[in-house]
């Protein structure tokens, strides 16, 4: 009996070939943008995707200060953090965060979409977010990436 049998190929850490992608966030909706970035950081856009190996690519995001939020999220959404002291719970809105640290809005959104383990922390390190249209990764020759956002 001659049946075809195919073996599933698992990617290995040393065999992963990473690329650099450049995304312009100007006018894009935060949630839709973040889910696409997380998809690329995890490596799910590649046929060699393996859940237990970091197969993702590097992502550079520019114009983070010009990202959009829909509805009343700019004023109603709250980011909560805790200082570690009694009564040390602090709140911030996206509007406040965009004024002081515009990169953090995208960083927080993407980080929340990655796995909560060592692998997720490793994937997160491949994200570089900049408020303006300048970045310091010209030497890596990043490819401009057009996202298909609805």
Image (spheres, grey):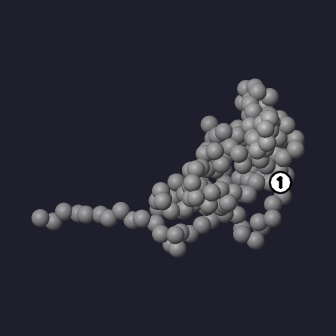
- Residue at the far left in the pictured view: 1
Q: Residue 146: where, in percent of width, then height?
A: 66, 50
Q: Is 150 positioned to the left or the right of 104 in the image? A: left
Task: Out of 65 and 108, give the one closest to the viewer.
Answer: 108
Q: Is 118 positioned to the left or the right of 142 in the image? A: left
The answer, for residue 147, to whether it is visible in the render is no
Tell me if residue 48 comes above or below residue 27 in the rendering.
below
Question: Residue at (76%, 44%) from the top-left corner?
Answer: 84
Tell me if residue 81 comes above or below residue 71 in the rendering.
below
The answer, for residue 31, to whether it is visible in the render is yes
- Residue at the far right in the pictured view: 99
Q: Residue 35: where, in percent of width, then height?
A: 61, 44
Question: Residue at (52%, 73%) from the top-left corner?
Answer: 14
Question: Residue at (72%, 49%) from the top-left corner?
Answer: 107
Tell me if residue 112 comes above or below residue 58 in the rendering.
above
Q: Name the quarter where the N terminus is drawn.
A: bottom left
**Quadrant hosting residue 139:** bottom right
**Quadrant hosting residue 81:** top right
Task: Out of 139 and 89, give the one closest to the viewer.
Answer: 89
Residue wearing tag 1: 133
């Amino acid at each position: 009996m001659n049946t075809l049998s195919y073996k599933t190929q698992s990617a290995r850490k040393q065999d992963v070939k990473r690329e650099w992608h450049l995304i312009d966030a100007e006018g894009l909706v935060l949630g839709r943008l973040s889910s696409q970035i997380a998809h690329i950081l995890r490596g799910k856009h590649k046929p060699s995707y393996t859940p237990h190996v970091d197969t993702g690519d590097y992502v550079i995001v520019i114009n983070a200060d010009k990202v959009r939020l829909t509805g009343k999220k700019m004023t109603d959404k709250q980011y909560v953090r805790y200082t570690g002291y009694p009564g040390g719970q602090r709140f911030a809105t996206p509007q406040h965060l965009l004024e002081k640290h515009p990169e953090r809005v995208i960083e927080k959104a993407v980080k929340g979409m990655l796995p909560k383990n060592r692998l997720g922390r490793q994937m997160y390190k491949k994200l570089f977010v900049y408020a303006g249209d300048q970045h310091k990764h010209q030497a890596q020759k990043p490819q401009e990436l057009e996202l298909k956002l609805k």
